[in-house]
Image (tube, rainbow, N blue to C red):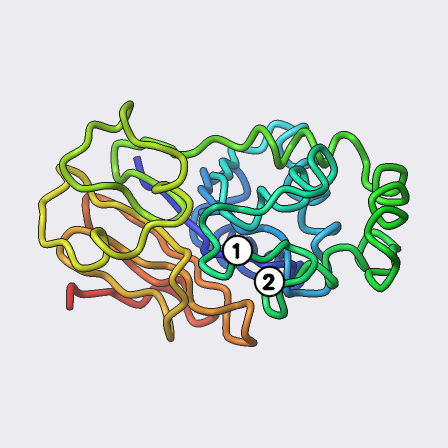
Amino acid sequence: MRLYAIGDVHGQLDLLTAAHERVFRDGGRDAPIAHVGDLIDRGPESRGVVEYLLQGQIAGRPWVVTRGNHDRFLPKFLHQPDWIDPGLSSARHWLDHPSLGAAETLASYGLDPALPRERLHAEALRAVPAAHVDFLASLPLWFLHEQALVVHAGIRPGVGLEAQVEHDLVWIRKGFLDSEVDHGRLVVHGHTAIRTATLYHNRLNIDGGAAYGRPLCAVVIEDRVVHLLTDAGRAPLLPE
C-alpha cells in the first residue's frame, strides 16, 4: 500500500490544501495521508489548519497527524500558562520567544498577542475551541505504516519504538540526523527545515521550509521508492 506524507505546515492553510490537491490528483481523494506535525505557529492561519484537518478526520478521511513540538505550545499555554518547553535552549516562554510564532497563532483565533499574559490567557480560554485543544493535545507521537515510520523530529537510534520518549520524537536532531544506523524502516520526519524534501539512506526529511515561504512538501512512498509530488506530477527522489 502506498503512503502519502506532508511536511511541517506551520499555519499555511493555502499550502496545505494545495499539497492535498497534489495528493488527490495522484492517488484519489481517499488516499491515506500522514502529516509530520507542526500544524501551528509562524503562518497566518493556524486556526484554519487545525479546523481543516480536524473536520477531515471527523468526516472519516484517512488522515494521520503526528505531534510536532509546536503543536504542544498552545494546549500547554491554555492548561499551564507558565509552562516552558524543556526542548527550548533559550528557556523562554512560547509568548516571549521572537521566532516561535505564538503571535500569529493567537491572532488567527482573533486574539491580541500584545495583551498582558494573564488577560491573554483568560481570553484564549474563551476563544480557542475545546475541540482544537483536544485535537492538538491528543495527536499521536508516531505512525507506523508498512512503507515507513512517520514521526515529527526523528527517533533515538537503537531504542525500541515503544521505549522512545516524547522529547526525542518531537525535538531530536543531534544523534538522529547524523546517524548512519539502519532503523529497519524508512523514517519520515520534518522538524529540521531544509530546501526541499530530501531522501537519505535511512530517513526522509520532508520539512521543505513552508514556515519560511518555501513550498509545503508532499511525497508518495510506494514499494520503498519515494517521489516528490509537484504540480507537474511525480519527481523521483534518490538517496543522497
Q: Which residue is mark 2?
A: 100
Provide the secondary structure element on which disc 1 rests.
Answer: loop
Instruction: Determine whether 134 is above or below 43 in the image.
Output: above
Question: Quadrant of residue 162 in the image?
Answer: top left
Image quadrant in which the C terminus is located: bottom left
Of the residues shown, which amino acid type is indicated by label 1?
Ala
Number of the label disc, if any, that sits on residue 1 = none
Tag 2: amino acid: Leu
- Label 1 or label 2, whichever comes before in sequence order: 1
| Residue 33 position within the rendered picture, expressed as x and y whole percent measured from the top left | 46, 42
Does dot 2 land on a helix, a strand or a loop? loop
Task: Identify which residue is drawn at 34% across, 65% down.
Answer: 197
Q: Say above or below: 5 vs 131.
A: below
- Foreground residue, 186 or 220? 186
Horizontally, is 53 left or right of 28 in the view? right
- Mark 1 crowd level (few <14, some 14–19, many ≥20, 10 Å Cα): few
Residue 128 x %, y %: 81, 41
